[in-house]
Amino acid sequence: MSDIHTALQQHFGFDQFNAGQEQVIKHLLAGDSATAIFPTGGGKSLCYQLPALLLPGLTLVVSPLIALMKDQIDALQKRGIAAARLDSTLSADEYREIVNQARDNQLKLLYVAPERFNNERFRQTIERLPISLFAVDEAHCISEWGHNFRPDYLKLPAFAQRCGAERMLALTATATPQVQQDICRAFNIKPECMVRTGFYRPNLTPLSHNVSAQNRDEMLHSRLRTNPAGASIVYVTLQHTAEEVAQQLADSGFPARAYHAGLKTEQRVEVQEWFMASEHAIVVATIAFGMGVDKANIRAVYHYNLPKSLENYAQEIGRAGRDGQPSVCDMLVCADDLTVLENFIYGDTPTQASLQSLVSDLFSQAEQFDISSYELSRRHDIRPLVLRTLLTYLELDGYLQAGTAFYANYRFKPLQSSKAILANFQGEKQAFLAQIFRQASQAKTWFDIDLDKTAQAIGSNRERILRALDYLAEKNYLEVKVSGVRNPYRRLKMPNNLMELAVELHQRTLKREQSELARLQQVLDLASLQSCQVNALAHHFGDTRSQPCGHCSWCLDGATAEPIKHPQVNIESPVWPQLQALQQQYPLLNEPHLLARLLCGISSPQLSREKLGKHPLFGALQQVPFKAVLAHISG
């Protein structure tokens, strides 16, 4: 165990650990799995980076955040630590090179997204590697009742077991007591191996200001000028808001740029690198920015729009002041934000009719079937993440059993002639490859191959053919492309009544809707709380503090923002006379929920299919509550 202090100094340049780090690392080096629940900026990444250097095999880091992967890998490589990532931004050559490095034991850390396990080529590769540590970042995503549930996370424990991972590490900054229990149960982590360091950070000053839509920009400019200069993040809800606010700030002389998921990859990378290199940069961003960005000297985090939950708020303000220096967290509490945030929540809830058609579709299939979640989403007008959640419900309730996702379409492009390729092999292997090549059909320079039909035709199995193609790609004999992800399922039992099952699923989605609305209300309650706001936030995450913090809005001023009320809105609008012609052109808009989504600016798979997101009426009533628009249409 004395090696950990030597490694800490030698590889990371630190003389001592942050709170909780040493305890977590000792659990892992003793062979136990562990959970690390540290506040944002508390040093979670060291809990797997340092053990990776002391353990013999590979440390696999699962994270949904490409920004985290890139930032951490750059830092590790500068320290001479062999680390790499596999994600969708890599070229075929880059991917192949990293896989070869992993197979040759040249890597200590490999970062991947949870969706990577849907790739059967990746699974076959990873199952042949010695995995000493399987680390899962943002582990709260495994809990259905967490603030950011991702169904793909539910399958990670099984993948870790298939990989033969010797130990697990689950990491998060935002887990309530219930979510903490879900994490430990899912990853089979003993309660005594869960390490929590407490939420409170004395160098952060969380403030809330009650503003109107008319004076919000003026307040933001004022706070930027009043607070000490330094790198800052301004969080907004919508992409177009990021662009507008960044332009306003730039026009006023602030070094501000926008960042959101709608930008091209190279633009996002450019903005992130600009921000990382600057002492005074201001990024106006949606929540797509900041996840995993390791910049210690962020002096301020502003919430131009309300955060959608206390978990999001805690994570976002936690990006400030990681160097321990005083930093400000300003939340601008505006009533006008409520409608947009609530409408996003309503937009995730499928209609009863959508669920009935989904259930009928799934249970009319053969006992074993496969689906494209993309096609299923568009067919039944259910958002992809919501659809994956519904399928997970059906798995957990024993109706379906998911298999391992596979690609329906394989293509390869020979980089040498087939004769030259086959000359590298002899006997049965050469004959086997020749059979594969004969089953492929050529379309110009690329060859299409159906793995299942090929396996049947040559009396082999899909897995061996896949391994052969993978090997040929590694050796640079050919280039392989895949597409068309299919998810296989086996029906375990039929519902007694399809309609009742659809109603039950609808009730569960409505329960999640109410849960998300309650999360939003918790943000409002905190902003208007007439007591120490920091203590209340800490209590939400299971901490107990007896003394007021002395530096939140209530402690400083003895008062907080007034309770928020919905602004009065006038639903009468010139859009109504225009709808009849639009409904004639697009008959699907005769469905009230779909029309309400269009007017409120809430995307849906069917609206996207018809490209109605670009129609002038999309979002025409985005400041009107969804329920009010729906009632007006239906009434």
Image (spheres, grey):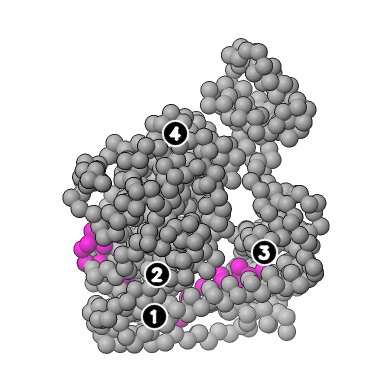
- Of helix, strand and loop, which one carries label 2? helix
**Quadrant of residue 536 within the rendered picture:** bottom left
Q: Is residue 289 visible?
A: no
- 633 with respect to 8 (left or right): right
Q: Are marks 1 and 2 in contact (CB under 8 Å)?
A: yes
The reply to whether the C-beta atoms of the residues labelled 3 and 1 are less than 8 Å apart is no
Crowding near pointer 4: few (<14 within 10 Å), some, many (20+)? Answer: many
The residue pinned by badge 3 equals 397
Of badges 2 and 4, nearer the viewer stands 4
- In the rendered image, the residue lying farthest to the left is 15
Residue pointed to by mark 4: 102
| Disc on the earlier residue, 1 or 4 | 4
- Disc 3 residue type (three-letter): Asp
| Amino acid tagged 2 | Tyr
For the residues marked 3 and 2, what is the alpha-carbon distance in whole angstroms? 33 Å
Give the left or right position of residue 21, taking residue 450 as reference.
Answer: left
What label does residue 415 carry, if any? none
Q: At 45% across and 79% down in the image, what residue appears?
A: 522
**Above/below status of 111 relative to 181:** above
Report if the CB atoms under discs 3 and 2 are less than 8 Å apart. Answer: no
Among the two numbered marks 4 and 3 on one chain, the one whose residue lies closer to the N terminus: 4
